[in-house]
Amino acid sequence: MANRRDFIKVSALGIGGLAVSASAFNILKAAVPQDLINKDSDPQKGLRRYPTYCEVCFWKCAGWTYTDEDGKIIKILGNEEDPHCNGRLCPRGTGGVGMYNDKDRLTTPLIREGEPGSQTYRKASWDEALSLVATKMAEIKEKYGPEAMALFNHGSSGHYFGHMLKAYGSSNIVAPSYAQCRGPREVGFTATFGSGVGSPEPTDIRDTRCLVLIGSHLGENMHNGQVQEMSDAIDKGATIITVDPRLSTAASKSKYWLPIKPSTDLALLLAWIHVLIYEELYDKEYIDKYAFGLDQLKKHVKNMTPEWAYGITTIKPDVIRKTAREMANASPATIIHPGRHVTWYGDDTQRARAVAILNALVGSWGRRGGFYFKESLKLPHYPHPEYPKPNWSWRETMNGKYPLAGLAISNTLIEASIPSEENKHQIHGWLVSGTNLPLTMPDKATLAKAMQSLDFIAVVDTMPMEITGWADVILPECTYLERWDDIRVSPHREPYLALRMPAAEPKGDTKPAWWMAKQIGEKLGLGAYFDYEDYTEVLDWQLQKVGSSLEEMKKIGIKKFDRKSGGLYLLPGEDYEFNTNSGKIELFSTDLQAEGFDPMPVFTQHAEPPQGFYRLIYGRAPMHTFSRTANNPNLTALMHENTCWINPKVADQWGIENSQYIWLKNQDGIVSDFPIRVRVTERIRWDSIYMVHGFGHKEHKLSLAYGKGAADSYMITNVMVDPIMGGTGMRGNFVTFLTEDPHV
Amino acid sequence: MRYAMAIDTRKCVGCSDCVVACQTENNVPIGYCRDWITETVDGSYPNVEIELRTERCNHCDNAPCVRCCPTGASHIVDGGAVLVTPNKCIGCGACIQSCPYDARYSHPEGYVDKCTFCNHRVIKGEQPACVSVCPTKCMYFGDLDDPDSDVSKALKNRKYKALAPEAGTKPHIFYMI
């Protein structure tokens, strides 16, 4: 977060060191036409607006893109009817104009020249670039079968390429948002309630009386609707309990901040479960009626007392008891938040299970102020021929491991791309859409080996990223503000549809993903799967089927429908069957037991940092998302580099000063490519450091982001894989400090 | 009629949406800002408190920037907003030096620029852009003379403070604590 003086300093650099002196002003002023200065006092005259939903993060807030009299996109505002944003976008959504205006955007298709691995590209026509993709895909199909082609994707564009790939014969479609992010909580909650959490999370925060955040930094992660509801909850006097080794923004708003020793959260959760059961504070009626396995659980946590947890977590027993009682007092309007990025220590499904069990004990699932029953509208699929049945899928690449993975695992598909004796299901080609794998994936060595082994990589993106440097063909996509996309159907308290339409012509020679997928499909002889000229035909057909139309949606942007699945919450005494083996909430998981895993969560000790090393903890800043906003001119103006948070005692020991630049070295000797600025702060424990993810870009073409800050993911070489579902635990990495440039 | 703003520091998460919204609403050049976020940290681990504040021109009653302006470009309009008329401004920067809140900057087009309380929106009955986009709804704007305005209601039952009261500027941005 820039303070104002930093801001000015940065800006002066940004415009070529424009001097701030009175004489310079006069010279400048003389050069500026007077009519520019005398412009109308209303800068927003003559605007037109077009409906959209945001693509900067996954929250997909609906809004309006505004263009000026020249048709230039100038601002984006939230749609007041949309429950994701309630008319208020977050800084990234408001700053989405920067994605459109970014001077470094990809503007033309590019084809690699010369040897594989060379970094030289030449401009190509769309026909040449797409023909090359189709030819390579046909070759892969011919040589190895269509299953050898995989799609790595994130965001709206993945759907079109997924459809094309399924038509071609492969179901190897994967998003890192599962195994590198929220997968464990989906499995943990499904094992407990028979239903995953999904996105947006059905947390009834606006009506909660007690919100418990386990390392979840709401407010720094701008999951818009949730942050808004947290603010409502603060207004209503809800108790917030935050467990975090760092005084996060949310922790600073909390009645209780529990600065836990990192990697010990599961011990705290089990001690809370112990207190709720042994002090008989749990919701007895709810548990009796809906839950299975209380007796086993009671026996299981018998010795997991707050005193036991104190020695592990450093959280005092009376604080553990007091906070457990707060949760019980507010029950059932208590939310122990499932979190979102939960791939931490490799036992993450079990930690998510403990969170789910706690929610069951306070009776919050299906209750006001807890979790509501979400609902979305099902849009019919636009007709197309049946997909061919693949001979094998991503599940075979796991070789019998990770039995409860509900979606494809990116790390196993990456491993499956490396030839070896045991690899019987090798991937030979990748299509990558909207995900910058080098900054997303831990364990860079394996990723690089996989990419070097492939016959072919095509990358679709709006920006030159680290991943585009690995591509054989680069397909430049127009931004979300310049294209039609699928109707948003994400679930909420009521079902809503939201439309995205272009507000301006695509810049340069960029194209929407639906068009690219259709072209590739047609070149592969799969035209029957793309039976439309323009994607608006698909949208209108779908909308007509549910009683709306493209014409209507263009005017309103978002449309609400009535619920059909019953109430938001359980009625008093209502009979309800959960989608588990027992039909009940499973405190004791029969699924996990059947697969040979602990049916109830067990605490395991994780490695601690060696002398002189600190645990690497990473997270988000409210104005950035993934690694994709680090070059956005509006957002880099707010924050142009990440910092390394260090406790003052540690900084003192090292003789490191605030704002000094240092390099980081991890336990495996990996050194950060670029220096990172130190933030000495009392807001963090002495055994950990913290940095915001998404910085430290190595791609030279990102003129604002290149070399700014350090990349956490490059420091993550120790990966603890969750044996239940394949998630990559990334919080077991330790770094030390280098004060001299190690690269000279 | 006296416009003012109240900001609830218990709710502000320092996301900076107010900064971006001001930029896109008012054509503030990238790299400059009319509003910004300040974070203060008190105490030592683990007894630490932070305060996040969105800051901007305080639209003072006793505005030193208006008093020191040699051309009359800086002036106060009905409702109390302090504004700058660009074509009257010679960019001398006296106002920048006089402001205890560091709220003004030199626009690359050669004049001094600052928060206008979104006067162009307020005269149409709308909220300032920063207030209208804030995801936490931590900002309240309105007429202090009207007891039913958002700002009067917000301040009624809460403790609040102003910044740099010792400067004697009679500021009109209030922070609820």
Image (tube, coloured by chain):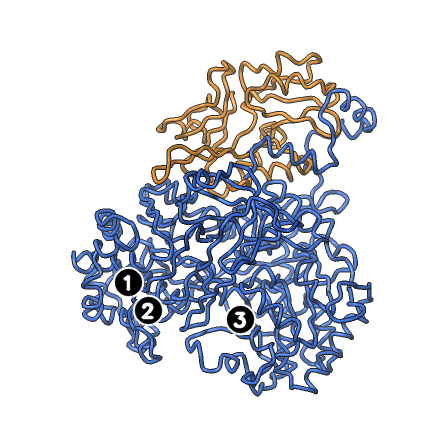
Q: x, y (%) of residue A260?
A: 34, 50
Q: Which residue is mark 2?
A: A192
Quadrant in which the C terminus of chain B appears: top left
The chain coloured blue in the image: A
Q: Are marks 1 and 2 in contact (CB under 8 Å)?
A: yes
Give how far apart the Cα atoms at labels 1 and 2 are.
9 Å
Residue at mark 2 shares a chain with residue at mark 3: yes
Give how far apart the Cα atoms at labels 1 and 3 are.
32 Å
Secondary structure beneath dot 3 equals helix
Subunit ID for the residue under disc 2: A
Q: Is residue A28 left or right of residue A217?
A: right
Q: x, y (%) of residue A733?
A: 46, 58
Up/down of A521 relative to B46, above or below: below
Subunit ID for the residue under disc 3: A
Secondary structure beneath dot 2 equals helix
Of the numbered discs 2 and 3, the one sitting upstream in the chain is 2
Q: Residues within 10 Å of mark 2 (few under 14, many from 20)?
A: many
Q: Which residue is mark 1?
A: A360
Q: Splitting the image into 4 quarters, where does residue A121 fall?
A: bottom right
Q: Which mark is residue A411?
A: 3
Identify which residue is drawn at 50% across, 22% down: B172
Of the numbered discs 1 and 3, the one sitting upstream in the chain is 1
Q: Amino acid at mark 2?
A: Thr
Using the rendered image of the protein, determine whether residue A91 is visible from the camera's viewpoint: no
Up/down of A122 relative to B8, above or below: below
